[in-house]
Image: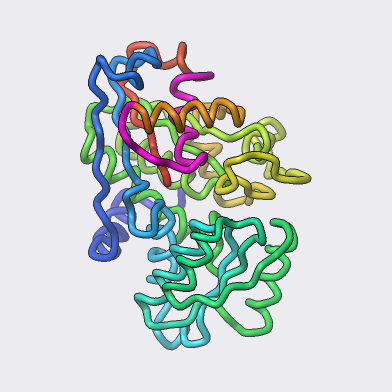
Amino acid sequence: MADFTLQDVKQVYDRIRRDIVVTPVLACHPASEIAKASSAASVALKLELMQIGGSFKIRGALSVLANFSDEQLRRGVTAVSAGNHAIAVSIAAKSRGVSAKVVMLKRSNPARVDACRSYGAEIVQADDVHEAFRLVDAIAEKEKRIFVHPYEGRGTALGTATLGYEFLQQAPDVDTVIVPIGGGGLAAGVATAVKMMKPGARVYGVEPFGADSMYRSFAKGSPQGIEKVDTIADSLGAPSAQPYSFALCRDAIDEIVRVSDDELRAAMRLLFRDAKLAVEPAGAAATAALCGPLKELLKDRHVGVIVCG
């Protein structure tokens, strides 16, 4: 059970709202390709790819940093990320006037690396995600920087819960929400907020087959890790589930399904062709599930799809 209330979510939302974009919701026309590819009664896309930094991550980063005073932040912050979280932490740190040192993968998209540098962040690169987490732990310990975890913790969940809260304010008829899962920070917050606002709503999580740590965790009943990340959706490539986000996901998510890289590619093409949305693979995960493994389960439902980045 969540250790925060809907009132807590509203307070965080009010606190960070001036620094974020209230991203739009696109109601798909019944004759649209997206609507026809699903069995849902209606489909609403929450366009979080239009958020500052290009993804939902700024919500969690701002929420976490709001818990610290300027004095506590004076040594700066650090983070680990394939890209989106690093960008968000860089933006959030700049907004607070402190330095950011972020660990990214050597295979990270160069545009994401350049974006972090443009906000003043120092970049450290790692060969793989496991080395990246070791490096960020060392930086936090040696330099006494505050570590802003990419998906674990109460502050992160409260930040991502503002997305679920905002979405249902905009689309109150939605009775089913599909949300991508990497480490679970987005899903934990969104699912918890949705269940608080509409207890009868269904929430489905989506992971790629090559990065299915939360799916494995649900099956085992405890947080699990994976040996390696093997998917085009690098933003969903968390090495393991963590206790806090796992617990929230377990309590608020009805089911997790997995999608293949081919299904992700098809969803990316569909979103671009039908809605002119250029999304990264992670941002197409919920749409891939809508038109794939969840199609029959969503018959006659009013579905909200998180286009996360």
Residue 70 pos. (x, y %): 40, 84
State whether residue 29 appears in this view: yes
In the image, 25: left or right of 34? Answer: left
Tell me if 150 is positioned left or right of 15 in this view.
Answer: right
Residue 293 falls within the magenta-colored stretch: yes
The residue nearer to you, when weighing 271 against 253, is 271
Q: Residue at x 25, y 60 (%)?
A: 17
- Which picture quadrant has residue 224? top right
Q: Position of residue 246 (x, y in %)?
A: 59, 44
At horizontal 27% and vertical 48% (from top left) the residue drawn is: 23
Residue 279 part of the magenta-drawn span: yes
> Who is closer to the viewer here, 57 or 205?
57
Q: Position of residue 35 (x, y in %)?
A: 32, 18
In this rendering, the count of numbered labels is 0
Toward the viewer: 122 or 212?
122
Where is residue 260 shown, x and y percent of the image?
Answer: 61, 28
Position of residue 226 relative to residue 136, above or below, is: above
- How is the rendered protein coloured? rainbow
Q: Which residues are magenta?
A: 274-294
Vertically, is 166 above or below 79? Answer: above
Q: Find the residue positioned furthest to the right.
A: 227
The one nearer the camera, 42 or 29, is 29
Magenta: main secondary structure equals helix
Residue 67 in view here: no
Relative placement, left or right, of 286 versus 139 is left
- Image quadrant of residue 193? top left
Q: Residue at x 24, y 51 (%)?
A: 22
Query: Quadrant of the rendered structure where residue 262 is?
Result: top right
